[in-house]
Image (cartoon, rainbow, N blue to C red):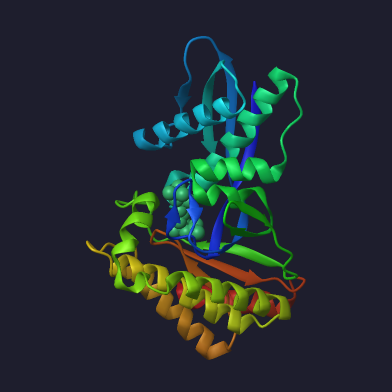
């Protein structure tokens, strides 16, 4: 039996729009969520690959098996596996598990096949690129704490700032439009024109802001970026969306908080209603903790 664990990640500059093989139309930048992981177990079997996980839909299971078949083909491997996958976080928290689950499956499949064949493991860069073919955003889960992904390859990026992730949980309802479908639909939006250039520019600005410690600028860029992606969703034909009234309510409070204290967390929202915050950790000093306390009082 082989076991591998991989983390989820949250993008501050979003991957939305792709070419075949899940090659992104623009650069993306993510923070790896080490506390949200998927563990995959593979065991050798005789007849056919088989998948067990209560956490995935029928469609997701098919995608998983297809990805395993792809890796076996790459490795010229003819055996079979049973696959078990388990998230460290409950389904109801509304965090997309596709990045962590595809990354964990990819690592585990290479680990198992390399051991059986007596080969050494491929490089992390190669496994990340293979994982990308299964689900694009999973290629970023191979690098921590920060990852930049452009074209076929994702890689580490050194951002000299320590942050802590927090989730504002709004709803755990399964999304009606999958991110794969969203990638297709956004092509119909009139706002799609210029989107990739905007994301590229923002990525440069964000890296500069984070590197120079210009926290407020970083907050402004992240805010513009997630609203840009959600505006694409809302202006597609047919339009769709993930933001719920409670999401908006919390966003307005976050904005008011920033206006009042001229400080606060970075904010982003993925293809779902939940809000991800990144807090700056400056040695966990008292003023940071005090700010977070005030924030939670305001939100409650
Ligand atoms: C909104 O990686 O789920 O989370 O490549 O089709 O599997 P596929 O899509 P997926 O897209 C994630 C899109 C996003 C933004 C992001 O993570 O960058």
- Residue 95 appearing in the image: no
Task: Residue lying at the far top in this picture: please name it.
Answer: 46
Q: Quadrant of residue 11?
A: bottom right
Task: Name the one closer to the observer, 86 or 48.
Answer: 48
Residue at 59%, 36% in the rendered image: 106
Above or below, 291 against 183 in this view is below
Q: Nearer the viewer, residue 153 or 32?
A: 153
Residue name at image x 46 percent, y 29 percent: 65
Q: Is residue 238 above or below residue 52?
A: below
Q: Give the image location of residue 77, x and y in percent.
A: 60, 20
The quadrant the N terminus occupies is: top right
Q: Is residue 241 left or right of residue 127?
A: left
Residue at the image position 46 percent from the left and 26 percent from the top:
52
Residue 28: x and y in percent read 55, 63
Position of residue 135 measured from the top left corner of the image (x, y, whole percent): 49, 45
Pick the residue in front: 124 or 2. Answer: 124
Q: Residue furthest left?
A: 238
Q: Position of residue 202 (x, y in %)?
A: 55, 76
Q: Is residue 148 visible?
A: yes
Screen quadrant of the C terminus: bottom left
Question: Is 117 on the left-hand or right-hand side of 299?
Answer: right
């Amino acid at each position: 039996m082989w076991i591998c664990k991989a983390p989820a990640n949250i993008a501050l500059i979003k991957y939305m729009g792709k070419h075949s093989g899940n090659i992104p139309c623009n650069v993306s930048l993510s923070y790896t969520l080490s506390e949200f992981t998927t563990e995959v177990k593979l065991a050798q079997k005789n007849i056919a690959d088989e998948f067990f996980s209560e956490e995935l839909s029928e469609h997701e299971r098919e995608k998983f098996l297809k990805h395993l078949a792809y890796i076996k083909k790459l490795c010229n491997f003819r055996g079979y596996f049973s696959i078990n996958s388990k998230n460290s976080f409950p389904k109801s928290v509304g965090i997309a598990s596709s990045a962590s689950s595809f990354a964990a499956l990819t690592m585990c499949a290479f680990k198992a096949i390399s051991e059986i064949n007596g080969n050494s493991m491929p490089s992390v860069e190669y496994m990340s690129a293979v994982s990308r073919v299964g689900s694009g955003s999973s290629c970023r889960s191979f690098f921590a704490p920060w990852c930049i992904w452009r074209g076929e390859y994702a890689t580490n990026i050194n951002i000299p700032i320590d942050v802590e992730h927090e989730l504002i949980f709004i709803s755990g309802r399964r999304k009606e439009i999958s991110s794969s479908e969203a990638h297709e639909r956004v092509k119909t939006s009139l706002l799609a024109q210029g989107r990739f250039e905007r994301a590229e520019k923002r990525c440069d600005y964000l890296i500069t802001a984070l590197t120079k410690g210009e926290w407020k600028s970083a907050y402004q860029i992240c805010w513009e970026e997630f609203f840009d992606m959600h505006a694409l969703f809302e202006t597609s034909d047919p339009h769709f969306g993930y933001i719920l009234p409670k999401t908006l309510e919390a966003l307005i409070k976050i904005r008011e908080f920033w206006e009042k204290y001229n400080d606060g967390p970075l904010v982003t929202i993925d293809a779902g209603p939940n809000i991800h915050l990144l807090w700056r950790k400056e040695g966990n000093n008292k003023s940071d903790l005090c700010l977070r306390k005030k924030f939670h009082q305001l939100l409650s």
